[in-house]
Amino acid sequence: MFKFSPDNPVKIAIVGAGAVSDYHHVPGIRLDRRAKLVAACDASEDLLQRRRIDWDVEVVSADYEAVCADPRVDAVVIATPNCTHKPIALAAAKHGKHVMCEKPLGLDADEVRQMYHACRDAGVVHMAAFTYRFAPSMRYLRHLLRAGELGQPRHFRSQRFLDWPETSWGWRQYKNQAGAGDLFDMTIHRIDFAIDLLGPIRRVCGAVARFVPRDVTKDGRACPPSEVDDWSSLIGEFDGGAVGVWEGTTLAKGYGMNGFGHEWAEINGSKRSAVYRLHEPHKLWLGGTGDDLAPRDVPVELLKPAGSPRDPHSGVPATVFRYDLMWEFVSAIVEGRDAVPSFYDGLRAQVVADAVLQSHERRVWIEIPEEPR
Ligand SMILES: NC(=O)c1ccc[n+]([C@@H]2O[C@H](COP(=O)([O-])OP(=O)(O)OC[C@H]3O[C@@H](n4cnc5c(N)ncnc54)[C@H](O)[C@@H]3O)[C@@H](O)[C@H]2O)c1
């Protein structure tokens, strides 16, 4: 087990010093006295020089292999384009480093299976960065469901609607770098938390679409057109008997909502319904027959993970819960246990997301096999 002391924090390297590292992971490390940011790795030298100052980090490198081999590093956070996750995760596992990787873990389930097996066999902590599991209202929803308050779950429903500009998404719009579009970027989170809430998905029928070419960059330069979906959907059946329906798009005009977009996920159970909404993560909407949906405050003890020093009332609620990912990763390392969600969870979600693409291509339902641990 990792022997934490104030003189021996978990020494973390960030690989991929772009947007998500700056918004989620570095603030998460800063909050946690058990963790220290010791290295930043990025393909861009310019960005590295900026991060050296902004993040106050001593070691900067463009070579992830060297960072993974560095004895001053205990754990690696992978936040690079999706096509690079697998080689970086395999390098981390080879050098015995704990690893948190952004979603989607890979370009397809075959890649993710290799990543999961390598980390499992190396005995390192592995974590998939499925952010929305950490929203306080999602924690409360899970708590109520497990306590039987909703009764037998019948329907799961998820909407993620964003109003994004119709310009290029950069690496995110090419299949060989991203795998897929809205499906792998957004809907995969909702597949993950649906499995967490309701158990394995047994079969799905999916559809994707691409409406916009995105052949111009934000600053007006021409670029190769998008190859990936900007709308994704599926219906599915869970092992436990419930059914689910998911829809996501980046082209929902009028759904900007201060950059957070619209997110709605709900469960209709035999007793009650419960609704989670991203931009009000300290409330859950609950209702039953003759008792229409109304907001209820998330109990104080569920606003953050036990022991976390984060003040849930400091900062924008829909932003700051994302720092709890790092708390979970470091806790798993310090406590010598598996992280939740793990690469196994990343694999289960990836298998379902891949099946959506197969279903769309073949115009059929796809059975989801049980994934061995
Ligand atoms: N969990 C979430 O809510 C969430 C949110 C946003 C992004 N993400 C995921 O995080 C990942 C990164 O997204 P982002 O928005 O930060 O992208 P980004 O483009 O802002 O940053 C990626 C960085 O990786 C660097 N990079 C590329 N190849 C590299 C390599 N081989 N070695 C080292 N650095 C390399 C790039 O130079 C860039 O700075 C993606 O997988 C994305 O899906 C997750």
Image (cartoon, grey):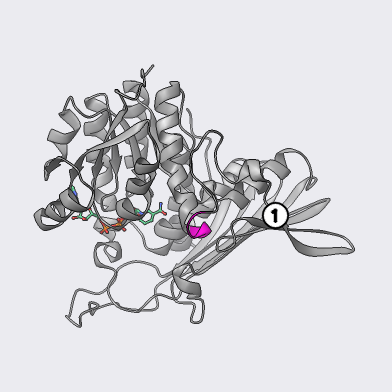
Most common SS among magenta residues: loop
Q: Quadrant of ligand 1?
A: bottom left
Q: Can residue 365 be spotted in the picture?
A: no
Residue bearing the label numbered 1: 297
Dot 1: element: strand
Q: Which residue is most to the right?
A: 290
Relative to 368, is 217 on the left or the right?
A: left
7 in relation to 204, above or below: above
Disc 1 marks a residue whose amino acid type is Asp
Image position of 55 (left or right of 199)? left
* Residue pictured at 41% horizontal, 70% vertical: 230
Give the quadrant of residue 171: bottom left
x 34%, y 79%: residue: 166
Q: Position of residue 25 (x, y in %)?
A: 35, 47
Q: Position of residue 42 (x, y in %)?
A: 17, 49
Left or right side of 169 for 211: right
Residue 230 in magenta stretch: no
Indicate the position of residue 187 as horizontal and vertical percent values.
48, 58
Q: Which residues are magenta?
A: 314-318
Q: Nearer the viewer, residue 241 or 315?
A: 315
